[in-house]
Structures are given as structure tokens and as C-alpha cells.
Amino acid sequence: MKRAMLWGTAVALLVFAAAIVVGVGVLNPPSADQQLERVLIIGSVPATDGGEVAPIGFVLDRQGGVKDLDMLSETSVSGVTANTARDAYPFGGGSAVVRALEPQLAGESPQWVVIPADELTALIDAQGGVRIDMPAGMSVYREGTLTVLPRGRTQLDGGEVVALLSALDYVESVQARKAVIAATSAAVSSAILSTQGTLAQLVADGAVTSSVVAERLPW
């Protein structure tokens, strides 16, 4: 009799636990209509002063559309001394970047994912690197390594792209800066779109920071 009661209690507890799991969505993930329609992708890299900046920013929509954002245009953010979305990142992470981009986001405040330098490198390398037209030769240091970038069209791997993004302050031409950012954004968005679940897995693994849970990301 006592054994039967113990078994009954154990079964009841298992049923209760299963109900909790289903209730929080572990066994019942969000349906398609609960997934995001769009997300703001932010790429962060080390700055020359030892901090972090975010030179990469684009909106990715559920249909695979990509809208590049100008991270270098001047803006104002309440309570922040930075005057571009790129430089707003150290003052509040993804949330600060969203506030800085408000004029370009048409009043929206999208959920965001910040991809750090190591993951940017991996995504770029997965696309075979980035082809960039360098207006002039330059040399940049990153983590004690000297990277020499020749003038003209050149193919860069992920580490070289991150080094260049970190040293954008030394690229005199604004057009050249924007060309580097655009080429990088194209490679990163292609890497995310080429394999379903790439972005969600990065969020689930804790490899990136985000304002949204992995289950709501269709990418």
C-alpha cells in the first residue's frame, strides 16, 4: 500500500513538472507567429582606446531582407556624450545603439543582437572572407599582430576585417569607411541567412548578447 502511494506521488510530481516545462515553452517553443519579424544586428569590435565600438548595424527581416544603417552619421542620445551610433555602444550596449539609431529606425525600437569580434570573425570566415577596395595601403595592430592592407582590391579574412574595423578612425575617407562597413555587413548577413538557426544558436550558446531569447529568432 505504501509503495503504491509513493509511486502515485512520483507520477503526480512528474506530471506537474512536465506541465511546468510545457508552460514555460521548453517543450512547446513559440509558434511562427510569435517569432520576430525583424531584428537589429549590431557588430562590436575593440576600439583603439581599449574600449568597444559598434561599427556594424543592419536590420534583418524575416523574409531575408537586409537594411543597412549608417553607424557613422552624427546623432544625439540623451545622457550620452557620443555623437554616433558606433560610439554610443560603450554607454549602454545594444540599447544605447538603438536610441542613437532612432532617426533611421522610423520610430521603431527593435529587439537587438550584439555580435562580438570573435563571432564576427567566424561568420566572415564562413563566407570566405570579404573583398574590399582599399583607397590606400595601411597597417593596423590587433592583439599584438600587425596586419598590412595594400592599396586596391583585396580579399580579407575575418581577423583582418575586425582589425580594420577597429582602426576605422585612421581611415581618412568617410566613403572608404562606409565601404568597409557595407562589405562586412553583407558578409555577416549572408552567413546568418545561409544556414537556418545560426543566429538563434549563437544566442542560445551565450556567444552573443541580446534583448531577445533564442526561440523567438527565425534565423
Image (cartoon, grey):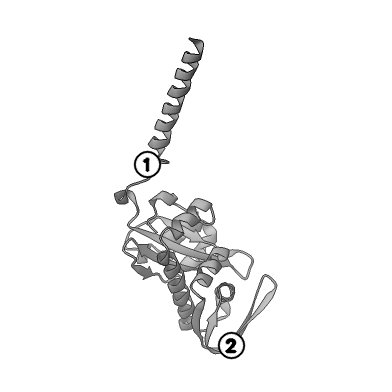
Q: Residues within 10 Å of mark 2 (few under 14, many from 20)?
A: some
Residues under labels 1 and 2: Cα distance? 53 Å
Q: Quadrant of the C terminus?
A: bottom left
Residue topped by disc 1? 28
Left or right of 181 in this view: 37:
left
- Mark carried by residue 53: none
Q: Secondary structure at mark 1?
A: loop
The image shows residue 102 at horizontal and vertical percentages of 38, 62
Quarter holding residue 171? bottom right
Looking at the image, residue 56 lies above or below residue 34:
below
Of discs 1 and 2, which sits in the foreground? 1
Place of residue 100 in the rendered image (x, y in percent of width and height, measured from the top left): 43, 63
Q: Position of residue 215 (x, y in %)?
A: 41, 49
Q: Please identify the residue farthest to the top as the structure is shown.
A: 1
The residue at the point 44 percent across, 18 percent down is 8
Choose top left, top right, bottom left or bottom right for residue 69: bottom left
- Nearer to the camera, 131 or 136: 131
* Residue in the picture at 50% in, 65% down: 43
Residue most extreme to the left = 33
- Amino acid type, mark 2: Pro
Say which residue label 2 marks.
150
Q: Residue at x 70, y 72 (%)?
A: 144
